[in-house]
Image (tube, grey):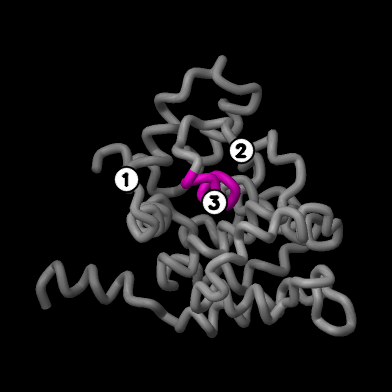
Amino acid sequence: MTTATAEQRAIAPAMTSAEWAAKLIEALAPAADADGRLAETVSLADIARYVADGEPAGLPAALPARLGKQTKLFDLLICNSANHYPRTLDAAYAEVGTVDPAALVRWGEVVAAALENAYLWKGALQVPARANWASALIHQMLGWSRLWPERPLFRKITSAMFERALVADGLDPSTLVVAAVATPLEHHKHAESCARSVGALCDFGEALLR
């Protein structure tokens, strides 16, 4: 087997985007009402369809107004960061490194729309506005990184995973790594904490060398 073939197999999707979206929706269910809705016009099925297939394409633009004040969803997402318990998203995130990178981008867009207190992450690192989904995911997945190395997911959520997703979204794969080391601390109150979160990725050193 050639090295290229081995690498392709290593990053080949372990499950379809639809299967991964279903795992996410199962974890988000406690935030929905009895009819499976997160807001009047946004259902769990809508989120699953968008993450899996990218339809409807206009969903992300409408999400902030519809999900931005969904307290149950916000609490569930933040209670799954690196330094909180319980973490019901762990079952879905255990496969996150092997799903279609485009599905990860779309999930990041949903997370960016749902997280309150965007000042804690949005704009903290000098990345293109188009990469806000990546900043949101770093914040949501890793929190402040205090307990990150102790988690089973430590070697599942990687710089390489984010690089593939950034490329899928038409961005430079080094966007996050460069921002983590090059953003001046005076740029933003939370620049240091967000840079530390990127640096907490287990393969960050390898990413620096790429």
Describe residue 103's horizontal placement relative to residue 205 as left or right.
right
Q: Nearer the viewer, residue 179 or 102?
A: 102
**88 left or right of 2?**
right
| 55 to 146, vertically: above or below | below
Mark 2 → mark 1, Cα distance in angstroms:
18 Å
For the residues labelled 1 and 3, say whether their Cβ atoms are less than 8 Å apart.
no
Element assignment for label 1: loop
Can see residue 85? Answer: no
**Residue at position x 49%, y 64% from top?**
104
**Residue 135 at x, y = what percent?**
55, 44
Who's the residue at 85% across and 61% down the image? 72
Q: Of the residues shown, which amino acid type is indicated by label 2?
A: Lys
Instruction: Give the residue type at disc 1.
Output: Asp
The numbered mark, 3 or 2, whose residue comes first in the sequence reads 2
Q: Quadrant of residue 50?
A: bottom right
Amino acid found under the numbered disc labelled 3: Trp
How dense is the environment of label 2, judged by Cα within 10 Å: few (below 14), some, or many (20 and up)? many
Q: The magenta stretch spans which residues? A: 130-137
Residue under numbered circle 1: 172
Mark 3 surroundings: few (<14), some (14-19) or many (≥20) residues within 10 A: many
Give coordinates of residue 130: x percent, y percent.
47, 46
- For residue 131, the mark is none
Q: Earlier in the sequence, mark 1 or mark 3?
A: 3
Asked if 63 appears above or below 182 in the picture, the reply is below
The answer to whether the residue labelled 3 contacts the one labelled 2, judged by CB atoms less than 8 Å apart, is no
For the residue pair 46 and 146, the one nearer the viewer reads as 46
Q: Position of residue 23 (x, y in %)?
A: 62, 79
Numbered tag placed on residue 122 in the rendering: 2
